[in-house]
Image: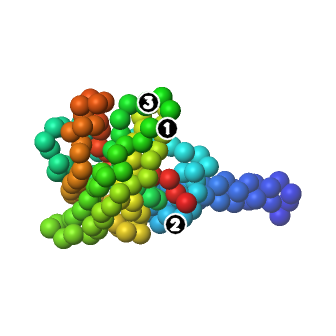
Amino acid sequence: MNVLQKMKKALLLLVFLLALWVAVSAAARHAYFLPGYGSALNLIFPPNDIWMPLASAQVQKGVRKYEFTISHKYPGNHEVKVSIPRQKGLETLPPELIVTMEIEQKGQVLIKRSGSGSSFWGFERQGTNFCQYSFPEDVSSRGKILCHVLIEGDIDSLLDRYGDVVIAIGKGPDK
């Protein structure tokens, strides 16, 4: 075997290994397997749509219950967010707001979480994160699942004050 043939074999092996790494990374990025590796990849090289909500709705006066059909795209923590347009300063949402989230599939409850949340401030919106869960650890289903959200507290005063109150379910920070 001459040197040229050995170089061709080495190059072919390198190309094969690179293609295998790309395929494994793409599958891990969407939690088909190795979700920890996928979360790390998404942290280092975040996809453009990673922070887009899986579902959202404008909060309306007198409406406390919301229902969303969601399908997870990326592994890691997810949460329910109640947000308002960004305000000057570090004003927070009222601490008496409590959100209860129930995720079900085929009539079976997979997760039920409830409680008060933690504040966040973004460039365009600010609000409170509630009911954190992890995909695929807590919810392993890839298909569409039903998420019921109940808001308790004086949400009507928020609507009177800010007008634009949004509830959303989406990717949260991974720790």
Quadrant of the image containing the C terminus: bottom right
What is the quadrant of residue 161 in the picture?
top left
Q: Counting other residues with Cα less than 10 Å from the Cα at mark 3, is it few (<14), some (14-19), or many (20 or more)?
A: some
Mark 2 / mark 3, whichever is N-terminal: 2
Looking at the rendered structure, the kind of residue marked 3 is: Gln
Report the disc number at residue 87: 3
Report the disc number at residue 34: 2
Percent position of residue 53, x then y: 36, 43
Query: How far apart, in angstroms, are the residues tagged by discs 2 and 3?
Result: 40 Å
Foreground pick, 114 / 16: 114
Tell which tag, 2 or 3, sits nearer the viewer: 3
Q: Residue at x 80, y 60 (%)?
A: 6
Q: Residue at x 80, y 55 (%)?
A: 7
Tag 1 near tag 3, CB within 8 Å = no
Percent position of residue 147, x then y: 23, 56
In the image, is residue 96 above or below residue 127? below
Side of 22 relative to 99 (left or right): right
Side of 119 relative to 112 (left or right): right
Label 3, secondary structure: give it.
loop
Looking at the rendered structure, the kind of residue marked 2 is: Leu
Looking at the rendered structure, the kind of residue marked 1 is: Leu
Percent position of residue 78, x then y: 40, 55
Mark 2 / mark 1, whichever is N-terminal: 2
- Name the outermost residue toward the right: 3
Tag 2 near tag 3, CB within 8 Å = no
In the image, is residue 57 above or below residue 32? above
Foreground pick, 166 / 53: 166
Residue under numbered circle 1: 90
Is residue 153 visible in the rendered image? The answer is: yes
Query: How far apart, in angstroms, are the residues tagged by discs 2 and 1?
Result: 38 Å
Query: How far apart, in angstroms, are the residues tagged by discs 1 and 3?
Result: 8 Å
